[in-house]
Image (cartoon, rainbow, N blue to C red):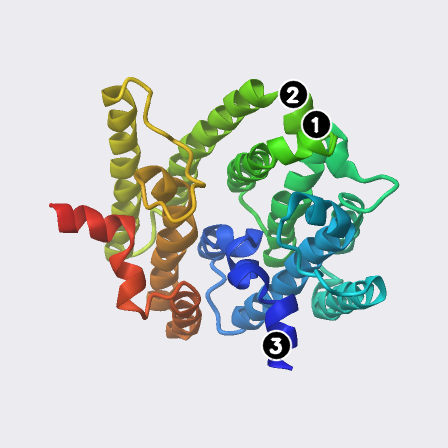
Amino acid sequence: MFKTIHKYLGWRHWAVFQYNSIFENLFILFGLLLLNGQTSFFVLTDILVFVVFSIFSTSYGYLINDFADRELDAQHQKANTFSGDSGIHAALITGIMFALSAVAAIRFINRPFFIALWLIWFLLSTFYSLPPIRLKERGRTGLLAAVTAQRFIPVLMVYSIFKAVEIWFVILTGAYVFFRGLSSDLNHQLEDYTNDIQTETQTFAVKTGLFRGKKILRFSLEMEKLLLPVVLLYTIWRLSKMPDYLLLFMVALVLLYLAGYFYSVFLIIGSKNKVSVNPFGPGQKTVFQFLHHSYPSVLLPLGLNVILSFLNPWFLILLGLQMWMRGLFSFQVIEKSFIFNIFKRG
């Protein structure tokens, strides 16, 4: 039983936790709770059910993609969750994952726009890979479909379930998530560029060309880095009546990001634009990886969770779950982090 769970839910070293829009952008949920004053014990239930929903939904999205790409991945000699499985078995597992997602979604069907968002997500996630539509081979449309389904809609669901009342917070965080998703999905296409050329897979990167694709990626990376501090400063402004010690803690979080950002600018200027700004290299712990992933996905949600825990100690449950999920109870994980290495070198 555990082997089955590990294979289909824990695919690619439990990537369902790493490449999950809700986990990537958990700070948006926590920021929304603070802005709306939703710090009661009862909101924890919705958060936990929504997290389960996001895990099953993300798994469905990736499994339906692997289901559709079994033959293509074999040609590319790429890992595929369903390698060695029959088509019927693969379809059954994918269907079960969608059914689990649907069960978790029941709790939220009465929330504004949730059903519409869920239906759009299902259609985009399914027909991104499945023929005859197969959006991933439709250039710009396919890339936008991937960003929308995998990153943008899950965050819209957060606004639906947890009642976003700050319109500028919605606009700013929405723009940030869009560019962050664009960076990730476009980078994935650029990494597969050679294989897709050989198999005549008409992705956006193939249609637009390698050089232009890299320029768009660079623009997207810069946009997400500029938008995040705007989101944080707006949030601080709207939370100015929060207790001073918590406000100072949040200001410190923003200053940490700004220090990293200006350090990255210094590196780019000092190297005459020759340093690699790509944050997606496997195993690298650079300032660019810190700005794209470690800070927004790990440090920032942890920091906001600490603030929520001061307001209501029940949120320590989420703090503990976050630390466990990120492996922060292991000194070896902390030792490999960018910040630890900065202090070590200092």
Give the farthest residue toward the bottom: 1
* 3D distance between C-alphas at marks 2 and 3: 41 Å
Residue sitting at x 64%, y 48%: 77
Return the residue nearer the eye: 273 or 24: 273
Q: Is residue 112 shown to the viewer in this render?
A: no
- The quadrant the C terminus occupies is top left
Q: Nearer the viewer, mark 2 or mark 3?
A: 3
> Can you give x and y, in whole percent of width and height, for residue 178 in the image?
57, 37
- 168 lies left or right of 122: left
> Can you give x and y, in whole percent of width and height, for residue 151 in the image?
60, 45
Report the label total: 3
Dot 1 amino acid type: Arg
* 3D distance between C-alphas at marks 1 and 3: 38 Å
Circle number at residue 208: 2
Q: Name the residue under label 1.
A: 140
Circle number at residue 34: none
Residues at marks 1 and 3 touching, judged by CB atoms closer than 8 Å: no
Dot 3 amino acid type: Lys
Q: Mark 3 points at which residue?
A: 3
Neighbour tally class for label 1: few under 14, some 14-19, many 20 plus, Cα within 10 Å: some
Q: Which of marks 2 and 3 is nearer the N terminus?
A: 3
Neighbour tally class for label 3: few under 14, some 14-19, many 20 plus, Cα within 10 Å: few
